[in-house]
Image (spheres, grey):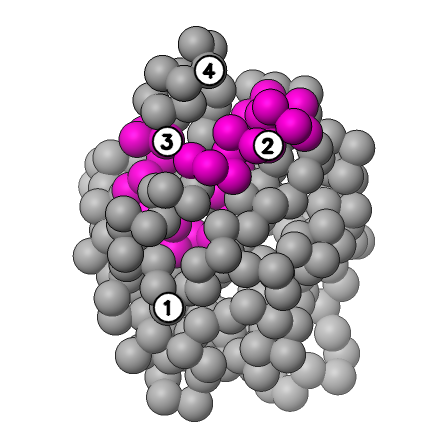
Amino acid sequence: MTKQRILVIIPISDKGARPFIDAFKREIEPIRHPNVQVDYQALGDRATPFIQSRAAELWDGRDIARVALEAERDGYEGLFINCFGEPAVEAVKEIVDIPVVGGFAPAMMNAAMVSSRFSIVTVVSSVVPMLWDLARQWGMANHLASVRQAGIPVEQLEDKDALKSALLAQSLKAVQDDQAEAIVLGCTGMLEVNQWLTSELETQLGRYVPVVAPVGAAIGMLQSLMSNQLRASRITYEPPTEFPQ
């Protein structure tokens, strides 16, 4: 049987993506369906090394669209634009005829399935208003208890001790002060920490608090869309007539 193929578009430069590739693979492998092949591609040297602003999303958007179009032509059957801020996701849905997901919506939908009120813990303060905008766009703002920041920029997420300490502190505040019932990790670079954080929260709070990892949520959602032969509505996402062929 021929395997279905997913392309994970890492929407930053090759240099910026390099430290995360192996961890992405380790996080995705337990979720990957046996009949699915997952490949990875960053954007090359022109792209930003990380995304923590609307300007960076705009800068990288054209290359994201280019890679998405090439992936569809190469026979990929699903695309994951691997960033919690979902850069260019809505635009790419207009220009390809395969399912497309980003990091935000699948994670939030997972959280809404297991709680009625949840908090995001993201990287730095510049991202906080961007995520509130996405929450309003997806109709999730009424379920969002808070958006907290770990104070660790993307390029420092490899420091797992610092990341774990900050995530635990902010997650406890989200539950105790903001009345969150679940936690969503607010960056797809926060890798291989969700099970640890779940255990720590249960130890300290005495109750199970779900922690949603966006990479796993996105791959799970994308595989479901592919299995059910679903993609973006051409009423909602009408192909642009002005887009160069």
Q: Which mark is residue 205?
A: 4
Q: CA distance from mark 4 to mark 3?
A: 12 Å
Q: Measured from the top left, where is residue 107 in percent x and y? A: 53, 39
On screen, residue 159 versus residue 87, left or right, reads left
Which residue is at a point 75% across and 84% down the rendered structure image? Answer: 242
Q: Who comes first in sequence, dot 1 or dot 2?
A: 1
Q: Nearer the viewer, mark 1 or mark 2?
A: 2
Q: Which mark is residue 197?
A: 3
Q: In front here: 16 or 93?
A: 16
Asked if the residue under mark 3 is in contact with the one under mark 4, i.e. CB atoms within 8 Å, the reply is no
Say what secondary structure mark 3 lies in: helix
Say what secondary structure mark 2 lies in: helix
Q: Quadrant of the C terminus?
A: bottom right
Which residue is at a point 76% across and 78% down the rendered structure image? Answer: 241
In this view, 36 is above or below 53: above
Q: In front here: 106 or 65?
A: 106
Asked if the residue under mark 1 is in contact with the one under mark 3, i.e. CB atoms within 8 Å, the reply is no
Residue positioned most to the top: 206
Q: In front here: 65 or 231?
A: 65
Q: CA distance from mark 4 to mark 1?
A: 31 Å
Q: CA distance from mark 3 to mark 2?
A: 13 Å
Q: Which mark is residue 155?
A: 1
Which residue is at a point 65% across and 55% down the rendered structure image? Answer: 128
Which residue type does callout 1 highlight?
A: Glu
> Residue beneath label 2, please?
174
Q: Quadrant of residue 178?
A: top right
Q: CA distance from mark 1 to mark 2?
A: 24 Å
Residue 150 is one of the magenta-drawn residues: no
Which residue type does callout 4 highlight?
A: Leu
Q: CA distance from mark 2 to mark 4?
A: 12 Å
